[in-house]
Image (cartoon, rainbow, N blue to C red):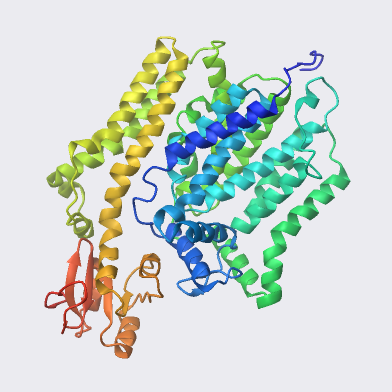
Amino acid sequence: MTGMPPVRHPPIRLGIGLLSALGVFCLLLVVYLPYVGSVHLFDWDELIFAEAAREMLESGNFGRVFVNYAPFWEKPPGFFWLQALSFHWFGVNEGAARLPSVLFTAATGAVLCLAGTFVGSISFGVLWALLFGLSPLPSFFGRFGLIDPTFNFFVVTGILCLFAHDETRRRKSGEERLLPVPVWLPGGYLTISALSIGTAVLIKGPLGLVVPLVCFGVYKLLVREPRLSVLQLLLFLGGTLLVASSWFAVETLNNGSEFVTQFVTYQMRISGTNDGHPGPVYFHALVYLFGSLPCSVFLVRGILHRSLRRERRFQILALVWFVFVLLLFSLIQTKLLHYTLLIYMPGAFLAAGVLQSIWQGRTRVHPLELTGLGVLGLILAVPMLAVPYLARNPEILKQLVTDPGVYYYLEVPVAWGVETFAPGGLWVAGIVLTVALFALSRPRLGITALLVSSAVMMNLFWIVFMTRVDTYVSAPIISFIEQVGDAPFVYYGPRTFLPPFYARRQVANPSTPEQLAVLLREQPNLQVVTPRTEMKQLAGLKTLKVLDRNGAYALLGAEPTQKRQNGPIAAGTPID
């Protein structure tokens, strides 16, 4: 690039950029919001976080985190404050628990759109945002009440504002001053970045500081001009740490160092053990390959894509960002699908550069990319078609699965009509149509068809599959909680956070017959909700009888002597 004349872009209209970002935000809300509250919350994380927020609201204590009325050491309270606010406004329900994730995933798309406008053009910003927001996995987890979508918004904003601040300090070419500076805020982009990164730490912990600083630090080793200002760097770090440590400092002053000690212990454990979620080192790379379609197909060419000036510099930052986060979570032993959602933003940027060139007719889809899109898309459709087929043909399922616990779940009457093939069928149709349109040199229609089919498919996936998973997994337990009413009960078996949230009270979770026996001696009329696979362990507790069964779960207790408020309970039978 040495010796090249300055590239003069037309002046950026901030108003048009903001309107485009607002349009992306509203579009993603339209995609994410339907049916978001139509299924119960899932173990563990959704229920942990929602219960923490519910107890905050119930107790009025927003300074400490409790789950099932016991101290919770694993996360700072930032996200729970947001959920508690949502519960205050909209009531304690599933939709309100998931609303922060929906809003902040849509807001992440808006921020990417605005950043893309300044890095390239308005059309590039919109394309970047939609590639991120409508990819299968970000769209899927954007509907869950998890910390990651909110955490990612603040990390992304922090990184983007660090880059924007760096760009405003350039003086060498005519394009450098086109990035508007928020003069209404002292410190401009650097202040926004410090506030965002500090908030990310309050939401999830030190990872919110590590990711932006490492990514931008490595970027500045590669792109050294303009040189960092030591004074600005110290002010930025001081402001970030001031925000990040604010709650930790208050907590330590008020309640001692127990939270900080327990929190650090948890961070060390989660990074060094699989915490019950093992996986191979390539787990996240494989997840990205399918979960980011179509971005993963164009990733390699996106890395090699030739760009100029500001776009080229951000391309370097995006590659550093992508590689660091992928390596970090590949080395961490705990493997969960949503852990690497942070790589979907830079991955979408790298793909957007290629797809914009294809959209504008400056290049064509490579045959290998077309083949990869078709093959990966069809492989992704296989489970969406296989699940309803097996559910409609249980005799085949019995030959494939020998675990009797699976059949307990399937005892719940769930209809798997022909319409349950719709998500997989639509996705196949969208992939075939996209490949055909690319092959016919209709790239704009091809890209549009792919994005639209992905958006519709994910909504149908939620309606068809998540509602049925909920019926099998969560609904039976909740039906027992409603049946028990105000009577004392416990949940026996593997750890779960569903009972306290839906019972709206503390619920013990014994895991051995001896622990349960102690509770039964204290409260002989105690009722027990348990997985049916755990019942044989309780055969020695002669006072317990089977009062009811529902799918994979059973309700146990002493012989009923009276009718409950919501109807009679059948005579108990011995535990078998």
Q: Residue at x 55, y 52 (%)?
A: 332
What x and y, as percent, mark residue 529? 27, 72
What x and y, as percent, mark residue 339? 51, 48
How many numbered marks does the figure carry?
0
Q: Would you place residue 559 above or below residue 370 in this image?
A: below
Which image quadrant is residue 412 in? Answer: bottom left
On screen, residue 231 versus residue 274, left or right, reads right
Q: Residue at x 50, y 64 (%)?
A: 53
Asked whether the viewer can see residue 287, the reply is: no
**Quadrant where the C terminus is found in the figure:** bottom left
**Quadrant where the N terminus is found in the figure:** top right
Asked whether the viewer can see residue 138, the reply is: yes
On screen, residue 317 versus residue 409, left or right, reads right
What x and y, as percent, mark residue 414? 19, 50
Q: Would you place residue 536 above or below residue 393 in this image?
A: below
Which image quadrant is residue 322 in? Answer: top right
What x and y, as percent, mark residue 220? 77, 37
Q: Nearer the viewer, residue 29 or 532?
A: 29
Q: Residue at x 73, y 22 (%)?
A: 309
Q: Residue at x 72, y 45 (%)?
A: 192
Which image quadrant is residue 393 in? Answer: top left
On screen, residue 552 versus residue 304, left or right, reads left
Q: Would you place residue 29 above or below residue 59 in this image?
A: above
Q: Residue furthest bottom?
A: 521
